[in-house]
């Protein structure tokens, strides 16, 4: 009887060890189709939209670059970053000069007609950024859309589309980067800047002038990585890598590094 109990203990130990080894490798990572991936992952990005990508003194850094590096680690492939202007970024993907676009891209029906997306890595919304002294005047959800205020947006973004569609009274000024728009706001030449919550939350934290975020009611912005429609192997691999990064805490760590008070702009 003593021998039988000892044998059972050994068997249970072997089973537990095997299970722990399987659990150590997240299922998403184990299932990645690595044999169909490019030998080098070429990532297209644009350095004018912090915190996703920031270009300063000839170098670029940011949330998307950190995520790209982590994806490369999970997939086991080297990553090469290609920095191009935002208005040329989608064409670079379509012409196969890059494999994936990682640049704070929002999923929209129009973009889905041309490209495919990995699962969203962040759900957020469009917000307005105003000077704190104007909070009483512009602090309501739709104040910037119901009055003749000067609103800055970044061209060809969902922020610009939101203002064009929902704010007919606004005097719209289009900028190349969110940095440029926020600078005009701090100098009092704009009443508000409308755009992605994470971008404006980051820029708010970088200014000496007191600024505040105001919700707009657009609460379902999904940020995701974009690939060509027929590149299902890469799409699946990116989804697997993202799941692995969620499980081990890497995704939250990178988001919290680059987006101050990320919970303020994150939607469930």
Image: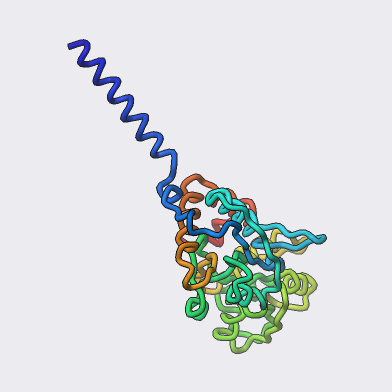
- Residue 178, by quadrant, is bottom right
* Spot occupied by residue 199 in the image (x, y as percentages of width and height): 64, 65
Q: Is residue 87 above or below residue 77?
A: below
Q: Using the image, determine if residue 252 lies above or below residue 199.
A: above
* Residue 81 sits in quarter: bottom right
Q: What colour scheme was applied to this rendering of the protein?
A: rainbow
The x, y position of residue 118, in whole percent, is: 48, 64
Look at the image and tell me in which quarter the N terminus lies.
top left
Residue drawn at (39%, 38%), measured in percent from left and top?
Answer: 22
The single residue placed furthest to the top in the displayed view is: 2
Give coordinates of residue 138: x percent, y percent. 63, 75
Residue 91 to residue 234: above or below: below
Camera-side residue of 155 and 39: 39
Q: Is residue 255 left or right of residue 189?
A: left
Q: Position of residue 67 (x, y in %)?
A: 59, 55
Query: Residue reaching furthest right?
Result: 57
Q: Is residue 133 above or below residue 2?
A: below
Judge by depth and name the residue closer to the eye, 193 or 137.
Answer: 193
**Residue at left offset 71%, top offset 83%:** 173
């Amino acid at each position: 009887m003593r021998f039988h109990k000892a044998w059972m203990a050994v068997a249970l130990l072997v089973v537990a060890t095997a299970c722990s080894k399987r659990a150590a490798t997240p299922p998403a990572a184990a299932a990645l189709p690595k044999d169909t991936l490019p030998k080098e992952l070429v990532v297209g990005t644009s350095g004018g939209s912090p915190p996703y990508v920031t270009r300063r003194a000839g170098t670029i850094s940011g949330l998307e670059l950190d995520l790209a590096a982590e994806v490369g680690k999970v997939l086991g492939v080297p990553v090469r970053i290609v920095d191009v202007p935002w208005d040329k970024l989608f064409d670079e993907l379509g012409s196969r000069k890059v494999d994936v676009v990682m640049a704070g891209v929002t999923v929209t029906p129009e973009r889905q007609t041309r490209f495919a997306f990995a699962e969203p890595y962040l759900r957020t919304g469009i917000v307005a950024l105003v000077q704190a002294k104007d909070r009483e005047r512009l602090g309501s959800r739709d104040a910037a859309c119901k009055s003749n205020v000067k609103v800055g947006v970044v061209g060809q973004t969902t922020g610009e589309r939101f203002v064009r569609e929902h704010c007919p009274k606004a005097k719209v000024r289009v900028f190349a980067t969110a940095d440029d728009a926020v600078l005009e706001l701090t100098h009092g030449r704009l009443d508000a800047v409308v755009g992605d919550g994470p971008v404006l939350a980051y820029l708010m934290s970088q200014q000496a002038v007191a600024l505040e975020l105001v919700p707009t009611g657009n609460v379902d912005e999904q940020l995701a990585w974009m690939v060509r429609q027929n590149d299902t192997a890469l799409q699946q691999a990116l989804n697997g890598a993202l799941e692995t990064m969620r499980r081990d805490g890497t995704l939250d760590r990178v988001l919290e590094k680059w987006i101050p008070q990320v919970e303020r702009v994150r939607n469930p």
